[in-house]
Image (tube, grey):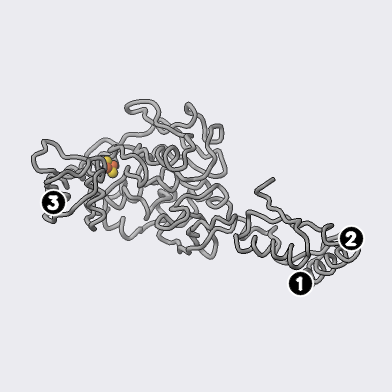
Amino acid sequence: MITIDGQTFSFEPGETILDVASRNGIFIPTLCYLKGATPTGACRICLVEVDGARNLVASCATPAGIDMVVSTDSPRVVKARRLNLELLLSSGYHNCLVQDMEPDAWTDLQLKGLDRDEHKDICPAYGECRLQAFAVKYGVKTGRFEPKETPYVFENVNPFIARDFSRCILCGRCVQACNEIQVNNAISQGYRGSRSKIVASGDRALKDSDCVFCGECIQACPVGALVPADVVFKGHLRTDEKKVRTTCGYCGVGCQLNLHIYEDKVVRVTGVEQSGPNYGSLCVKGRFGYDFMTHPDRLKTPRIKRNGEFSEATWDEALDFVTDRLRRIKETSGPDSIMILSSARITNEENYLAQKFSRAVIGTNNIDHCARL
Ligand code: FES
């Protein structure tokens, strides 16, 4: 048994203090911890006090122990967390209505998100940034430490992922998401000390690396260092977005995703972390392939080619046309002159119907699937 904040809990071998606390509804803040990946203990926000231990320990990386007595919110713990947050805010450009406000006033302003017009380059993660949220929670003020500027320039040279090194807190979550969750091994920690940086393929731009642009790193980033390239700043805050859960339409896996909508337009997509089959992960198409929805070239009605030219038709006209052609081919050349090629882009149920249609309606076993090509 382990005692956390005065309550006693049982635990399984291998569970960390954070695992036991979270399972039992005890909140411990985390920044670098990524579920499903090896804990690194990099950010030190999850520090807790263990009776008999000389130093505070990172709860995400410390195994629960028999008869351990843990405090998650003692004055010593809170003081250490506040200092860590203060240091993180002073390294890099965290302009989420913090740096340029009177130290005594900014917490209110954070909460209200006022004066947007004054902050054209406000962090695109505003309202969803965990560093910001914890800074507000612990009432951390800035100004005690000299702000440090990053030597690395903003990278926005691919259509998918923008990298703002000035907001990176080097927590390493993106590296773990890439290497341990998606197993793409495209990024890693690079350089040392004040020049530390998340690098891709020996410090190349993402577009020149092994990155497949699944965007798992964006989803893992707890701050605004990695964001979809086209939402770097669209004049709205994440708190203005409406979230609609749906199923990805690109293939039959059925990944669960959230469409983030602003002014009736999808502005970004995230994976639903609490639900299978994807548990937050998405591929490049699911995460970034959404602009077709409102694209002016999108076909919204069927088209039939007549005299070499496509013309718009109703669904009834299009289906009658196809039915008639299939019937005529079957009558003149036999059912085996027809083949149905099905698709991984449709659901399993629709694929089942396709083979039923092929065998029972057309009368041929000529049915195949694009995944075998
Ligand atoms: Fe535990 Fe970062 S969450 S050290």
Q: Quick one: quadrant of the C terminus?
A: top right
The disc labelled 3 sits on which kind of residue?
Thr
Of helix, strand and loop, which one carries label 3?
A: strand
In the figure, residue 365 lies in which quadrant?
Answer: bottom right
Residue drawn 43% across the image and 48% down it: 219
Upstream in sequence: badge 3 or badge 1 = 3
Q: Which residue is mark 1?
A: 314
Left or right side of 8 for 210: right
Report crowding for label 1: few under 14, some 14 to 19, many 20 or more residues within 10 A (C-alpha). Answer: few
Count of numbered badges drawn on the protein: 3
Of circles 2 and 1, the one toward us is 2
Spatial distance from mark 2 to mark 3, Cα to Cα? 78 Å
Q: Which residue is mark 3?
A: 3
Of helix, strand and loop, which one carries label 2?
A: helix
Spatial distance from mark 2 to mark 1, Cα to Cα? 28 Å
The answer to whether residue 142 shows anywhere in this view is no
Along the line of sight, the residue nearer the viewer: 275 or 296:
275
Q: Position of residue 316 (x, y in %)?
A: 76, 73
In the figure, residue 225 lies in which quadrant?
Answer: top left
Residue 248, numbered label: none
The disc labelled 2 sits on which kind of residue?
Ser
Please report contact status of discs 2 and 1: CB closer than 8 Å, yes or no: no
Report crowding for label 2: few under 14, some 14 to 19, many 20 or more residues within 10 A (C-alpha). Answer: few
Left or right side of 43 for 248: right
Of circles 2 and 3, the one toward us is 2
The answer to whether residue 330 shows anywhere in this view is yes
